[in-house]
Image (spheres, rainbow, N blue to C red):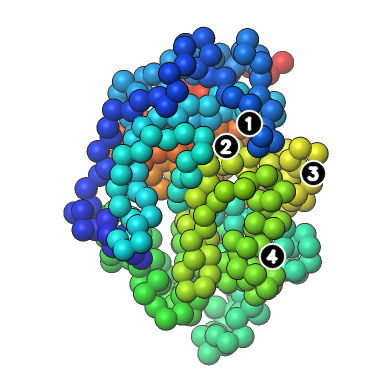
Amino acid sequence: MRRRQFMSLLGGAALTPIAATPVFADSQANCAIPGKRDDGWAVPSADGDNDINHAALCGMADRLESAGANIHAVLVARHGKLAFERYFKGSDEVPSRFLGVRVRDISFDADTLHNLKSCSKSVASLVVGIAIDQGLIRSIDEPVFSFFPELSDLRSPDRDRILLSHLLTMSMGLKWVEATPATGDDNDEVRMHMAKDPCRYVLGLPVTAPAGEGFFYNTGALALVSAIVRKATGRPLDEFARRVLFDPLGITEFEWSRFKGDSDAGGGLRLRPRDMAKIGQLVLAGGRWNDRQIVSRAWIEASTTSKLKATDGQSYGYLWWLRSTRLNGRVVQSIAAQGRGGQSIRIVPELDLVVAVTAGYYQDYSPEAFKLQFGVFKDVLQALSPPA
């Protein structure tokens, strides 16, 4: 995979966090209040309503700045309003025509597209749901090989048990080495992208467990999902997403990279943070955005319900992560899209809350980096007034 191959030329070194500077020199009194833009988001009044301690959130942002954290943006929506928005300066991987990606220092703002990495998978889940809502895909129980008759030579009794639902729950039961800084170029994502036919590569991998038996993270599943959406709708996933998801959400700017004709549903989407927060609000509202039903409530509920026990105390739905977090002596449940480097969209239904974060820790898998990234979410929770 070209972007990972270029990073290996850097020796696999972590992107060193640099001192971050807020883009807007707002006063402490109003640093957290988003400006009104013609993008469909309602914003609270300047006196700080919405049951959020804005001073605490400003303090959090100032601490991130003073600590030199490579956090790029933090946005908070509550009760359907975009209530907090802060952007920083930091190092980022950006697309390069000849080098795959390159590292640059960027002053982020509300118009900067950001790489979602594996948050793209959760957006792809919404697109699959819409295709099912429209009858273009019959159900999640469709055998995967029903979409790939040209690969029938790969069929076996074990592989014939793989259903679309197993792609969405990371439970195909096929051997897979995920791309991480530790694996360098010796991983199946690189090999998949080098293969003449990525779908043939994925479905040709050895069977290690019965389909559906257990969670095993596999970005190759999304190459299959992307091809299935194209075959079912007659459009590449990104084009179908533009028509049925992004346009209805008022998302006018995005990039979704393609590889060998198919959208990189496993990690190729770039969105503005305000639009990331829209994705979260759509899920929080049961598939609705500004009084328009975009995805069926049935799909939202099904895809964000635990199907398998995953890693790090989390569980997994249809390409969504589910976690319990302790807050002031009680436990709250959250739904999340999570991507390499610190990208996240977290939804807490019982608090009517969405938190979107972007960051640049692509090459840093250290416990300290993960603690800092999840710490932003916990700081936001601490800044909320509890529900009545």
Mark 1 → mark 4, Cα distance in angstroms: 38 Å
**As shown in the figure, which amino acid type bears the numbered disc 3?**
Arg
Q: Residues within 10 Å of mark 2 (few under 14, many from 20)?
A: many
Residue 37 numbered mark, or none: 1
Query: In this orientation, which residue lies closer to the viewer: 217 or 94?
Result: 94
Residue 237 position (above or below residue 72): below
Q: Position of residue 204 (x, y in %)?
A: 46, 80
Disc 4 target residue: 140
Disc 1 secondary structure class: loop
Query: In this orientation, which residue lies closer to the viewer: 230 or 142?
Result: 230
Q: Position of residue 191 (x, y in %)?
A: 35, 72
Of mark 3 and mark 4, the one earlier in the sequence is: 4
Mark 2 → mark 3, Cα distance in angstroms: 18 Å
Q: Residue at x 53, y 14 (%)?
A: 30
Mark 2 → mark 1, Cα distance in angstroms: 10 Å
Choose top left, top right, bottom left or bottom right for residue 53: top right
Q: Residues within 10 Å of mark 1 (few under 14, many from 20)?
A: few
Of mark 1 and mark 3, the one earlier in the sequence is: 1
Residue 198 position (above or below residue 55): below
Choose top left, top right, bottom left or bottom right for residue 105: top left
Disc 3 secondary structure class: strand
Residue 66 position (above or below residue 9): above
**As shown in the figure, which amino acid type bears the numbered disc 4?**
Ile
- Does any portion of residue 142 appear in the rendered image? no
Disc 1 + disc 4, Cβ < 8 Å: no
Disc 3 target residue: 292
Disc 4 + disc 2, Cβ < 8 Å: no
Query: In this orientation, which residue lies closer to the viewer: 264 or 98?
Result: 98
Residue 256 numbered mark, or none: none
